[in-house]
Image (spheres, rainbow, N blue to C red):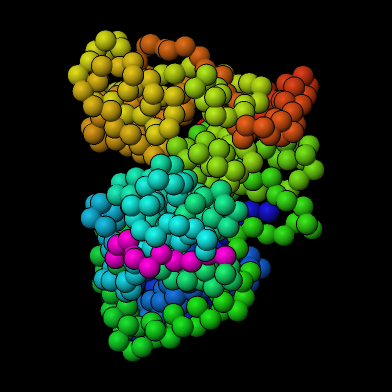
Amino acid sequence: MKKLFYLLAVLFVGIASALTTSCSKSDKNKPLIVACEASSSPYCYYLNANIDPPVAGIDVDLVEEIGKALGRPVEFKVVPFQNIFTLVATGEADIGISAITITSERAKRVLFSTVYDTSTQVAVVPQDSDIEDEAALKEVSVAAQVGTTNLEYLREVINPRVVLPYLTQADVNAALSDRRADAAVMDQLEAEILVRRSGDDLRINPKPLCKVQYGFIFNKENTALAESANAVIEKFKTSGNLLKSKEKHMEELWTHPGYGAMIEEYDGVKPFVVCLDPSFAPFAFMNRNRLAGVDIEMSEAIAEELKRPVQFRIVPFSEILPLIVNGAADMGTSGISITPERTSMILFSNSYENNTRRILVREDSKLSRISELDGKVVGAEKGTTNEEYAVNKLHAKKTVHYDNAEEGIRGLLSNEIDAYVDDETEAEFAMDKYKGKVKMMQVSIRAEEYGFAFRLGNSEAKAAADRVIEAKRRNGDLQALFRKYNSIYKTLDLNNI
């Protein structure tokens, strides 16, 4: 199986300089882990998994200068854009790059460097479009990348008739080129590259939407690294190297249109794209930076049944169904509950597992009945049926919406919420992971069935999934998969998840 995310490449560069003294001796020669997203041209774009490093761009040039100044080798982790913030905030990465816009909301979670470049957000439309301004965007379908301020601006300021969120900038560009979207919001340089590559097919609206400033991100506690990086950033700007880097990479991207593509060639066979959220064991989780779980093996089996190579894309759970509806992925998984509301927009496979909803509270909590949650603060994961239940069935004072279960449990432990609504399987794992800190209320809500999600009309993929589910259930392989991954997750070193 080929993997496009969590690519690791190590680049040893330079020797120690005067700035090395700003880091502790224990950091000397320790790899500088850099989380990046590889479709943010020209700031960070994908080259090839077989070269070292597999990415290039303005941000890559700059972060390599930081590594050289600190006397530390640089190691790149290529992940979806929204995952950069999680890796940095949890300390799994030292620096986050990829044209990250500085905002006050993001600054609550991470530490920003000084500004290293500025840009504008613009709208790109087909050449023959009559869309000329922001007012016209409100009446059409507009695409933007998940996790970016482009999508935030689109939703909160423009508020178009239809918002189309896509995982990567390449997906956004494809939706615009295929006319699945009437327009797309993106950063100025990305737009210039796209329009030049399209020939006469696309154009940039003349009036910019808003100005943005870019910075690198660091863990809130890592002020020494941020200060050292700031010194390198200032030198990079004042020496003219920023401008040289920008000119070099714009020319590279115009000359080599294949750069920045995240989809590999598979002998002419279109990959079977599966989007998932790897925070739901035993269905999908990370094991030493590799995807693992029942849904991973089932997805591989379904792709094999279809005689297509599988390609996994990691997204927040709340974005899985929109990506399926938009045609940006062939299948969605990660314990997706089959509901009447969802079946109106999604084609589901037959059920392959069921689960019961549970409510987690802190170990010292006195809450024991659902009625006692009246007036309390309750949390749930965005886009899930647990979120629907918390909002519509509980009489909570407030519902806090989390990107994933891990953030929800942390919110519970930090007293941000009084209870967290979760699936039973995930709740049991939380109790194992946080022994003596959380417990389940002795109440359970009706069981739900899980299925794999497909775009309406994709009967071929659904039929393949149903055949795989039935075969594995009949020969006992499905039950064996759940035993296998329950065991692996429960014994896994949590630092490797």
Residue 122, quarter of the rendered image: bottom left
Question: Does residue 51 show up magenta in the picture?
Answer: no
Q: Is residue 44 above or below residue 454?
A: below
Task: Determine whether, in the image, residue 33 is placed left or right of residue 408.
Answer: right
* The one of 298 and 192 positioned closer to us in this rendering: 192
Residue lying at 47% horizontally and 54% vertically, measured from the top left: 183
> Residue drawn at (62%, 26%), measured in percent from left and top?
348
Question: Measured from the top left, where is residue 463 in percent x and y?
Answer: 74, 28
Drawn side of residue 482 relative to residue 472, left or right:
left
At a point 49% along the width and 51% down the height, the residue shown is 182
In the picture shown, does residue 342 fall above or below 311? Answer: above
Q: In this view, does 71 lie to the left or right of 476?
A: left
Vertical order, 434 against 391 (above or below): below
Image spot of residue 42 (x, y percent)? 48, 72
- Residues shaded magenta: 201-211
Residue 496 seen in the current view: no
Residue 160 makes an appearance in the image: yes
Q: Position of residue 453 (x, y in %)?
A: 60, 32
In terms of image quadrants, where is residue 465?
Answer: top right
Asked if residue 204 is among those painted magenta in the image, a careful observer would answer yes
